[in-house]
Amino acid sequence: MSARRLLTGEQQAALAAIARCRTPEMGGHVDVCVDCGHRRTVYRSCRNRHCPKCSTLAKERWLQARLSEVIPAGYVHVVFTVPHALNDMARRYPRVVYEALFRASSETLLVFAADPRHLGARPGITAILHTWTQRLDLHVHLHCLVTAGGLDPTGRRWVKSPRGFLFSVRALSRVFRGKYLDALRRLSGTPLDTVLEATLYRHDWVVYAKAPPVGPAALLDYLARYTHRVAIGNERIVGFDGRMVRLRWRDSLHGNRKRLLVIDALAFLSRFVQHVLPRGFKRVRHYGLLAPAAKANALDACRRYFGSIGAPSRLQSAVTTTTLLVRIGRDVTRCEACGSRSLRMEPVAIGRTPLIPRGPP
């Protein structure tokens, strides 16, 4: 069976879009300098959310919008991890496994926060799905940025977390496990395999919770790198000889040492496509104070209480491709040969480029 037939429709579409990205097949334009005649060809991007080259502009706009909503009350970084025993199920039924993760983690946090013994308030939660390790192995987990407190039931007073941490991770782990398995049964519509369920109940599940030492803005900046991109960026791929791919990765088990992974091209693609999301699946979601239906009123209440939260961001429209390129030292309004601003744009005819091979080379 060919490598192409082993892929789902979403995976084939993602690889095809990445193969066409910024090639003649996408079309584009040529910037011609009127003064010196220098020509610079610019091809369009594919805008696929799995492409390692695209979506920087969308990411920057998302980040600016989230920074405008930061509440000056402290934050906690909570990570919910799905056991690797569910990896096979995640490959076969990713929508079910990922949807159950969002439901169970958000319900767990909101139930603990609503309990007067813990907080007795409604926090703001931003949840971002990650499914990979540095080596592109499947590792399903959810990053949650949670306010260290919340609005009381009246919506007029802010209740601060009374301890140095938000909730006990051991208690979170046990409740999360129960809610996740219940959500998995309901979403799949069938009972879990008896052996698998026994394996999942045998151990405590991993929940990490800690106040980010760099503050919410820096953590949002880190998480934003993968809100509109999946698994790997081009900068980590350091070589390809037609058969083997060389990529950098960080070994967190040995002091974050930088290492080099050399892997067969088809094996690399096999690892990459397991992180392609189901069509239309939202990998960034908001709950509590930041839930779309409640966010406007909740942030207004927080502004009245704190008096220092920015208004809903208007910077989203101000961030453009040109301003992003200027930020990294590239001024596309000037000729890269002579520096002149006298540029004329000419269209490029759409060409053809080879797509995914139907089988191993």
Image: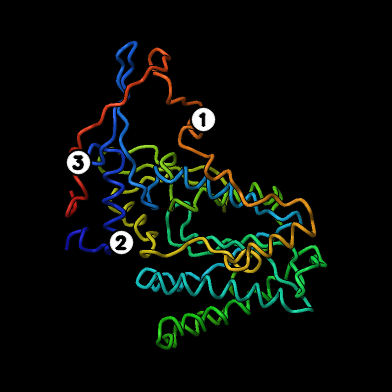
Query: From what the image shows, is residue 48 above or below residue 241?
Result: below
Q: Mark 1–mark 2 contact, CB under 8 Å?
A: no
Report the colour scheme: rainbow
Amino acid carrying mark 2 in the image: Glu
Residue 86, image x, y percentages: 45, 73
The residue where tag 1 is placed is: 328
The residue where tag 3 is placed is: 353
Q: Mark 2–mark 3 contact, CB under 8 Å?
A: no
Q: Residues within 10 Å of mark 3 (few under 14, many from 20)?
A: few
Indicate which disc, 2 or 3, sits on the residue closer to the N terminus. 2
Query: From what the image shows, is residue 247 above or below residue 330?
Result: below
The N terminus is located in which quarter?
A: bottom left
Residue 317, image x, y percentages: 52, 43
Which residue: 36% across, 61% down? 274
Rounded to the nearest angstrom, the CA distance separating label 2 from label 3 is 20 Å
The residue where tag 2 is placed is: 10
Rounded to the nearest angstrom, the CA distance separating label 3 from label 1 is 30 Å
Residue at the limit of the structure toward the right, as seen here:
162
Which residue: 43% across, 53% down? 230
Amino acid carrying mark 3 in the image: Thr
Residue 248, image x, y percentages: 45, 42
Q: Secondary structure at mark 3?
A: loop
- The numbered disc on residue 238 is none
Indicate which disc, 1 or 2, sits on the residue closer to the N terminus. 2
Is 247 placed left or right of 307 in the picture?
left
Is 293 placed left or right of 305 in the picture?
left
Residue 217, image x, y percentages: 66, 48
